[in-house]
Amino acid sequence: MPLDHIPDREIVERPDAYQGPNLSPVGLKLVPRELGPGVHALLANIPPKDNNGVIAGRDAAVVIDAGVTPGISAQIQALTAELTDRPLRYVVNTTYHGDHTFGNAAFPADVVIVSSRINKDNMSDLGYEKNVRSGNMYGDEKLLDAVDHWRKPDLVFDGSAEIDLGGRTVQLFHFGPGNGPGDTIAYLPDTRVAWTGNYLCHAGVAHMLLQGGPEPYIASLRRMRERLPELKMIVPGHGPMGDGPAAIATLIGYLERLGAEVADSYAAGRSIEETMTACTNPWADHLDPTLAAAMAAYPVPADRAVQGMLDLCRNLHRLNVLATYRLHQAGAGRPAPGS
């Protein structure tokens, strides 16, 4: 199996004592931030819970991502009505993951759900998806009982598409696999802002290799850099907004080093535990100062926000080492020595 193989489902194995992001909707309040006339990021008050967005044109509005429960979807729709008098016509799903898509069914039937074809193809088993996302609910798993229907995208695309809102066009891109196989980017040229879902977060955040390894992710990021040379800012699915080019460059650098170090460690016959120790951990001591400053700006105690992100990045890095190591094992068709 080649290292650029994309598994049919995301990895469910986790490192020992792993703690992933808390995506429970309890306490989540979306705070609008204006990025231009008719353009708003909807930022979670508690990181790393889900962010969203609202973009309005002359004739219509689009929402970015649907929320994890019908209750969060209702909050998004209420905020949209407060921020614009344009009718809500579209919802874009940046990924198939339930915290971005479980709220689809709570939008009116005449609202068109749009995403990549690959995202739709991955929305096939609601029970399985709810079980996977329950790991991020931290005691609030019962809230997912309200999700009894997984509404799939009504309109899909392969490489790129456009949504005409009247005097304003939202560009949609699928650059290739990243965090998941069908990551969808929503880019607004007149503000040079992109909503990037799980695909790209603030520079210095440890991303998640959930369904594939570093090599295809790096290729996708390079395509994004080539296609969006004017990109200025990103609104990620989780965490603070940030500089787009810096985020791309930092993530490419991290994935290149991760891929090389895991490959060397595996070739040397090291176990997964030994590989965890051998690989460079950019979060061993502290967060990137720019990221730390962004975390300190949240409406929660600054030290808690910074330490919480640092702890999360350490956990995600261990997951990324594990996922990459398992790809090498699968490629060899046998367990690694000492695993």
Image (cartoon, rainbow, N blue to C red):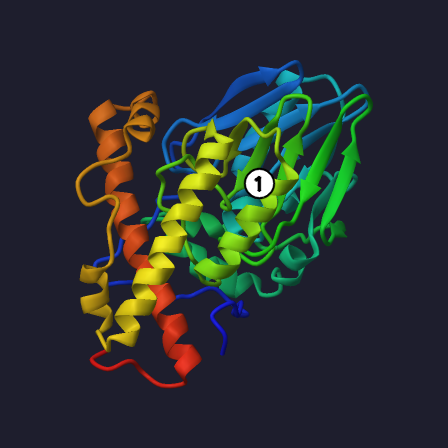
Secondary structure under tag 1 reads: helix
Between 8 and 126, the one lying in front of the other is 8
In this rendering, the answer to whether 66 lies above or below 17 is above
Q: Quadrant of residue 306?
A: top left
Amino acid found under the numbered disc labelled 1: Arg
User: Where is residue 120 drawn, in percent x and y?
Assistant: 67, 57
The residue sitting at the top extreme is 37
Q: Determine if residue 147 is in view.
A: no
- In the image, taking residue 185 as reference, residue 4 lies left or right, namely left
Q: Quadrant of residue 78?
A: top right
Between 102 and 165, the one lying in front of the other is 165
Residue at left offset 58%, top offset 22%: 40
Q: How many marks?
A: 1
In this rendering, the answer to whether 195 lies above or below 69 is above
Residue at left offset 68%, top offset 38%: 91
Q: Determine if residue 121 is in view.
A: yes
User: Where is residue 236 drawn, in percent x and y?
Assistant: 49, 36
Q: Residues within 10 Å of mark 1 (few under 14, many from 20)?
A: some
Q: Which residue is mark 1?
A: 225
Residue at left offset 36%, top offset 72%: 326
User: Where is residue 264 drawn, in percent x and y?
Assistant: 29, 68
Q: Which image quadrant: the C terminus?
A: bottom left
Between 328 and 33, the one lying in front of the other is 328
Residue at left offset 24%, top offset 50%: 281
